[in-house]
Structure formats: structure tokens, C-alpha cells
Image: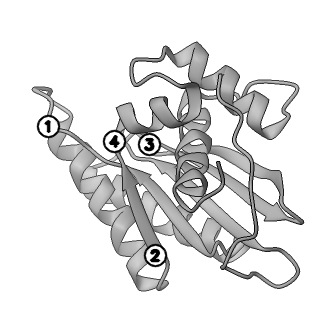
Amino acid sequence: MKKITFPNFSYHHENSIVRIIGIDPGLGRVGYGIIEIYNEKKIFLDCGVIETNKNKEEGDRLYEIFHDLNTLIDQWKPDIAAVEKFFFYRSSTTISVVQARGVIMMVFASKNIKVSEYAPSQVKLTIAGSGKASKKEVIDAVMYNLNLNHAPKHDDSADALAIALTKLNEEGFN
């Protein structure tokens, strides 16, 4: 497990140094995780999932993501965002996930929030020390780095926190 440490950061958010939102895209569930750096300390703020109603039409589900992500951004006011890159898989859900990711990217662009993108293997390598780390190893590393007593309820939100931590590592917080 890799412990990530944080030096001074160039972004500023009122009294904090930086606030970041990590996103794990999907149509049925979008994981999100919000972390703040304050006085060189990582502070866990929130994590969860945006769940869409599987009985609704795809366009309505995409609108749910649009609406709920806008609400999260308005509430938490992140300075930067990190989103998992999507690689083509031969799956019936591929197009839906790519469309959901497009909505997510559009929301961040509309709010002028800079987005960085990371492959799953890059997130695993950064957080857990191996690009082939298991889901449990990633969750354990997230808990360790954020001093959490309990794992996030959904794997998607743990992944989103890992994605946010990856962005912070890229910015020199290692």
C-alpha cells in the first residue's frame, strides 16, 4: 500500500488549499469522491453514488446524471476534477457508459473545472503500488490515505476517491 503525502499546492479554495472531485463514470451508477487539502492534510469530505433509474429511458438517465452532478458541484465547489478514462470493452453497456462520461465531461466544462483523466491501471499503480491491484487493495489504500475507519459503501465511490488521490499525486503530492 502506498501512502501519499502532500506538499504546498498551487490551487486555492477559500480557506483550503484545494478541493477535488473524483468521478468513476457509469450509466447506472456514477461514483464520486470529494477530498480537500488543508494545511497539507487530506480531508475526506464526501463520497457516494449518483444512481439512475434503470426503468427510465437512457436520455432521462443521462439527464439525472447531469442534474445530480451539477447539484454536487454547486454544493462542494471543487477546484479540479479527475475522471476515470474509459477503454473500449466488448459489452452491451459500452456506448451507454461512454455517453454518461460525455455528460460528466460536459458538466465540468460548463463549470470551467479542469479535468484530468486516468486509466484504471494508472489509478491502481498510484494508489496501491501495482497496476494490477485488486479491488480490496485499492479500497484498503484509499482508507489508509484518507484515515477512514470504514470502507465507502459502494466500490464506485471508493474508486472515485482513488481517482481523486491519483490527481493529487500527479500534482506533486507524493
Q: Amino acid at mark 4?
A: Ala
Residue of label 3: 53
How crowded is the residue under tag 2: few (<14 C-alpha within 10 Å), some, or many (20+)? few
C-beta proximity under 8 Å, tags 1 and 3: no
What numbered label is drawn on residue 114?
A: 2
Q: Which of the pair 111/137 is nearer the observer?
A: 137
Mark 1 vs mark 3: in front: 1
Residue 165: percent from left, percent from top: 61, 47
Give coordinates of residue 73: x percent, y percent. 61, 71
- Residue drawn at 50 percent across, 51 percent down: 23
Q: Tell me the distance, in whole angstroms, between the alpha carbons under discs 1 and 3.
A: 24 Å
Task: Work out whether residue 28 or residue 86 is closer to the camera in this orientation and state it.
Answer: 86
Judge whether residue 63 can be spotted in this image: no
- For the question of whether residue 111 can be seen, the reply is yes
What number of labels is visible?
Answer: 4
> In the picture, residue 55 is in which quadrant?
top left
At 21% from the left and 34% from the top, the residue drawn is 93
Circle 1 residue: 88
Residue at disc 2, secondary structure? strand
Tell me the mark number nearer the camera, choosing from 1 and 4. Answer: 4
Earlier-in-chain disc, 4 versus 2: 2
> Helix, strand, or loop for circle 4?
loop
Side (left or right) of 103 relative to 155: left
Q: N-terminal of the two: label 4 or label 3?
A: 3
